[in-house]
Image: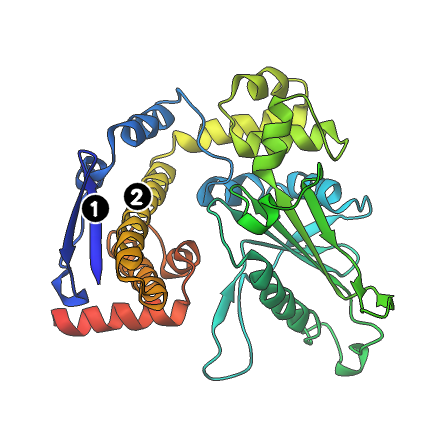
Amino acid sequence: MKYCIDINNNYVCTRLNMSEYTGKLTEKEMLQRLSDPVKQEYYDICNGVRYPSLMSDVIAKNCFDPDKHPERLEYLLRHVTGDSSIKVEGSFKNECGAAFTDAKKIIFDLPARLADGRLSDTDFQIHAQDFALKRGHIYGSELLTIQYSKVESQKKEEIDYDTVKEVILVFLLHDSPKEFKDFQSDRYIHRFYDYTAESGFSYKPLVKSVYVQVDKAFEQYKNGVDGEHDPDLQLLLAMMGNMNDKLVLDRVGNNPLFVGIAEHMRKLSLNKEVQVALLGEKFYEMDLNSIKNSIRREGLREGKLEGRLEGIREGKLEVAVRIVRNGMATPEDAARLAEISIQDLEAALKEQDSIET
């Protein structure tokens, strides 16, 4: 595979095998590999001059933690789903897999149990994913399987098709995929609550999926337009779009809930462990973008789409291994960030360990 890093705004590409990667990169070395604008942005965040992204993995998971801050997640879920009855009770295990030996594990972002027995997962997608809708189907199926499974406090006969509770999936899209951008509408929230056959027959499925175009909500906010007619929700989504925008900062102080989130973001950005995690995210983004750009150029020249996609997959795996080896993330988080299976990452880590020994 071709691996690229950006040094002083120049792409440096070399052929690397997994066996050629040795040792860990220090924080200083990672900072040196960031472009000057990204590096300055990181310094400003660490010094409290600017806010980190509310869509950042470490920031979102802390600010909307269903155990520590259920009221925040509850507010978000109520508004994006249009369901005022939602009450968050807490979290549940966020790593799941079907009952097959070779099944891939699914790692949810912010899984939560609701007071009425329903389950939810809120997914913060900071990068565009062309497969967002397909991912929703897979996540929904897995979440529904969990819902249909017996827990310790239940008897098997208590779980049946008639009694199983629905599940809710919310995808927050910081960079909307093309199919969403191409859809002509003022709406930036898309709720899939009904299945309709070509005959016109429809029914309400047990999986309710909601896709929120954060970027579109932010653009409308700046232009004084609101396709959903929910100004408070639009402000929260604008905070996710760009917390450092002056128009956003000018209004945050009017909502105590949002003030608490902003203060929490600032506090987190001054925490050393969070700073290391943020650096890991920026390093991952830089690494992955470099790989994608290089492979895309190579693929276009050679006209080989299949090879290009495989190269991107290998590149993601390489970056995930680097992040884990540098202590920037757990294997589970690295796999989720890189959009690869935890099994592939664990296999790559074992392969590297066997080579090094």
In this rendering, does residue 244 appear at all? yes
Q: Amino acid at mark 2?
A: Met
Q: Quadrant of residue 181?
A: top right
Which of 65 and 154 lies nearest the eye of the viewer? 65
CA distance separating discs 1 and 2:
8 Å
- At mark 1, the secondary structure is strand
Residue 80 coordinates in the image, percent (x, y): 71, 43
Q: Is residue 326 above or below residue 310?
A: above
Q: Position of residue 31 (x, y in %)?
A: 22, 36
Tell me which amino acid carries mark 1: Ile
Q: Residue at x 75, y 48 (%)?
A: 87
- Of the pair 277 and 224, the residue shown nearer to us: 224
Q: Is residue 208 above or below residue 171?
A: below
Q: Earlier in the sequence, mark 1 or mark 2?
A: 1
Circles 1, 2 touching at the beta carbon (< 8 Å): yes
Q: Nearer the viewer, residue 9 or 155?
A: 9
Q: Where 14 sits versus 69, above or below?
A: below
Which of the 4 quarters of the picture holds residue 42? top left
Q: Residue at x 24, y 36 (%)?
A: 34
Question: For residue 5, which numbered disc appears in the image?
Answer: 1
Question: Is 13 situated left or right of 249 in this image?
Answer: left
* 332 to the left or right of 185: left
The residue at the point 29 percent across, 25 percent down is 40
Rendering coords of residue 285 (x, y %): 34, 45
| The N terminus sits in image quarter | bottom left
SS type, badge 2:
helix
